[in-house]
């Protein structure tokens, strides 16, 4: 069987399972898919999983901090300037954290922050779904590798 067919079937099955599971246990479906995507974007494997999980988490923290800074700055500078300044500081921080090797996957931090914003500032929901999504990515990769190397008789 072609590798693209295997990838499609395995990814389709796991995606359907994730969609049903996330709805049944109250996790944010799209946030899980962003964690899953981060896993693959970070290169997959154990290293990609660690990188995606850590940077997604730091991104959610940065998102939280940007909201707090924006609220603080808005009192003195107005909402628009306060928001712009807090986003500038957050984006700078998310980029500069890549100085540390284990925080080097900059897109993961931005994905985490944007997930936090998109969930309506749901810190726990963002983190939980992105963790499970990253784990689904890992299972996806392992399942595709297993299916691709299995001999059909």
Image (cartoon, rainbow, N blue to C red):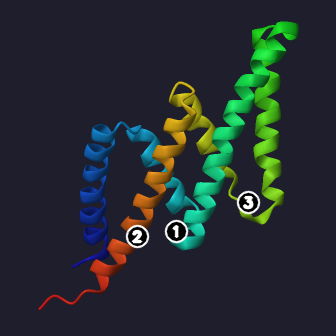
Query: Disc 3 designates what residue?
Result: 104
Residue at 45%, 60% (x, y): give it. Answer: 135
- Dot 1 crowding, Cα within 10 Å, few <14, some 14–19, many 20+: many
How many numbered markers are drawn? 3
Query: Disc 1 designates what residue?
Result: 44
Query: Disc 2 designates what residue?
Result: 141
- Dot 3 crowding, Cα within 10 Å, few <14, some 14–19, many 20+: many
Residue at 67%, 34% (x, y): give it. Answer: 63
* In contact (CB < 8 Å): disc 1 and disc 2: yes
Residue 18: tell me if it is visible: yes
Tell me residue 10's x, y (percent): 27, 65
- The mark that comes first in sequence, 3 or 2, is 3
Tell me residue 51's x, y (percent): 63, 62
Tell me residue 99's x, y (percent): 83, 58
How far apart are the two marked residues, 1 and 2, measured between alpha carbons? 7 Å
Q: Is residue 47 left or right of residue 79?
A: left
The local secondary structure at tag 3 comes to: loop
- Dot 2 crowding, Cα within 10 Å, few <14, some 14–19, many 20+: some
Residue at 55%, 59% (x, y): give it. Answer: 41
**Which part of the image, by quadrant, shows the C terminus?**
bottom left
**Which part of the image, by quadrant, shows the N terminus?**
bottom left
* In contact (CB < 8 Å): disc 3 and disc 2: no
Q: Is residue 77 left or right of residue 71?
A: right
- The mark that comes first in sequence, 1 or 2, is 1
How far apart are the two marked residues, 3 and 2, measured between alpha carbons? 22 Å
The quadrant holding residue 72 is top right
The local secondary structure at tag 2 comes to: helix
The quadrant holding residue 80 is top right
How far apart are the two marked residues, 3 and 1, measured between alpha carbons? 15 Å
């Amino acid at each position: 069987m072609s590798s693209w067919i295997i990838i499609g079937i395995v990814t389709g099955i796991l995606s359907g399972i994730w969609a049903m599971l996330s709805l049944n246990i109250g996790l944010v479906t799209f946030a899980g898919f962003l964690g899953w995507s981060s896993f693959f974007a970070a290169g997959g494997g154990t290293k990609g999983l660690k990188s995606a999980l850590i940077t997604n988490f730091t991104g959610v923290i940065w998102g939280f901090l940007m909201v707090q800074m924006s609220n603080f700055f808005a009192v003195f500078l107005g909402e628009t300037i306060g928001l712009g300044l807090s986003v500038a500081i957050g984006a700078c921080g998310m980029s500069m954290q890549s100085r540390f090797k284990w925080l080097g996957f900059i897109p993961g931090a931005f994905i985490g922050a944007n997930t936090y914003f998109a969930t309506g500032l749901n810190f726990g929901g963002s983190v939980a779904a992105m963790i499970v999504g990253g784990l689904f990515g890992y299972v996806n990769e392992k399942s595709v590798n297993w299916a691709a190397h299995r001999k059909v008789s």
